[in-house]
Image: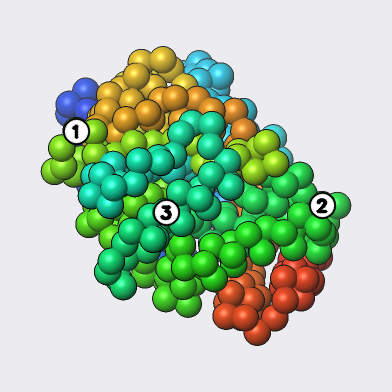
Amino acid sequence: MIWDPAQKAGVQKAVDGFQAANPDVKVSLEQVPEDQYYTKLDASLGAGEGPDVMWQSSRAPVYVEGGALEPLDGYIEKDKVSMDAYPDKLVNLYKFDGKQYGMPKDQDVWSVVYNAAVFKKLGVTDVPTAGWTWEDMLRIAGEIKAKQTSSADVPMYYNYDFNRGVGSLIHSLGGTVVKDGNGTVSSPQGIKAFEMIKDLQDKKLIPPVKDSADFKGTQSLLSGSIAMAKVPSWELSLLAQANVPSGTFHMVPQPSVNGSRATDTNGLSYVMNANSKRKDAAWKLIKYLTSAEGARLHAEGGASMPANVSPDVKAAYYKANSKIDGMQEAFDVTLKENYLRTTTEFPKIRAVMPEIESTVAGPYYAGSMSAAEAASKADAILTRSLKQ
């Protein structure tokens, strides 16, 4: 069971590869919308059923504590699977009390993609480059805005949410979101990060935050209603597989802030249901899906950047997304500066993110509180959750 429709084709291609090699095992792939995934999963696991193999993310500790996931150490040792094939930070995400519960599937990479056709149509020749800065982004977005004629168009989309947007800027500025069991947003860096995002909104360089709940940067890039967007790796196949001329989409790292391009990362994993009646087959599937061969098929089919770091896998991923110019160069820069997403490193705070968005970020972007007040309220909520 998985949740992302944009990656379903990639996962299915890998499943098909597994079934071709293991005709005695039948695998059915179910994609459940993300907002329903955990509700459905909890109901089925609570009834002693559920999928044999599933995706997990930073909620994994809850399922481990509840006894819902099967430790994989015995299988890993028996088949001599090397965990060196995956980044340590992603391997350790799924290790609890010395036991490995998940095999890394992918890794998140954030970058900026711009639509060259939109720039050309507007007559804007000042385009993003690999070495651009936040100030460069503001200048370019301003030039785009001055040339746009439709009230429905905006220059760009930049991730504004607290966990991934504000958090990345705090890290780039040299601050922290959480430290020593407390929220630490009430710092000069935290306040500045809030102000930087609001400045984009107030200058009308991004859509108003209050109207952005259903805004899709990739779809807007495709339609041409925006010229550039900060895009996560799990959505890039939507651009790479689009019916547009080659050279339409170009990728660069996100603009540097204070000399840093810090971006958050996370990684999904494949895990096994502790109640599975087919554990040997389930392990076979997990091992295949996260192997170099399985990861390559994921990449070729349009899934996110694989966690398996085999050169062949990376090459397959870049080839599958070759319609986006500059991807490998942008990723090479970004992968060096990423950090574990705050909700990934501190799973307890995941539950309060909706509260921060609704009672802190929303009112702040609407202008009903200052950046200092927003940072202070965010800290209070973060600290409370960490102490529970």
Which quadrant of the rendered structure holds the C terminus? bottom right
Mark 1 and mark 3 residues within 8 Å of each other at the beta carbon: no
Residue 195, position in %: x, y?
A: 66, 64
Tell me the amino acid under the disc marked 1: Ser
Tell me the amino acid under the disc marked 3: Glu
Q: Nearer the viewer, residue 326 or 103?
A: 326
Which badge, 1 or 3, comes first in the chain's sequence? 3
How far apart are the alpha carbons under marks 2 and 3? Answer: 39 Å
Tell me the amino acid under the disc marked 2: Lys
Which badge, 2 or 3, comes first in the chain's sequence? 3
Element under disc 2: strand
Q: Which mark is residue 143?
A: 3
Q: Is residue 111 visible?
A: yes
Tell me which corner region of the image, top left, top right, bottom left or bottom right, holds residue 386.
Answer: bottom right
At horizontal 58% and vertical 47% (from top left) the residue drawn is: 135
Quickly name the residue at label 2. 179
How far apart are the alpha carbons under marks 2 and 1? Answer: 45 Å
At horizontal 20% and vertical 40% (from top left) the residue drawn is: 241
Q: Say above or below: 205 vs 61.
A: below
Quickly name the residue at label 1. 246
Q: Nearer the viewer, mark 1 or mark 3?
A: 3
Tell me which corner region of the image, top left, top right, bottom left or bottom right, holds residue 284.
Answer: top left
Q: Is residue 65 visible?
A: no
Left or right, residue 260 beside residue 226: right
Residue with the most extreme bottom position: 368
Residue 79, position in %: x, y?
A: 46, 18
Element under disc 1: loop
Q: Which mark is residue 47?
A: none
Left or right, residue 261 beside residue 37: right
Residue 108, position in %: x, y?
A: 48, 41
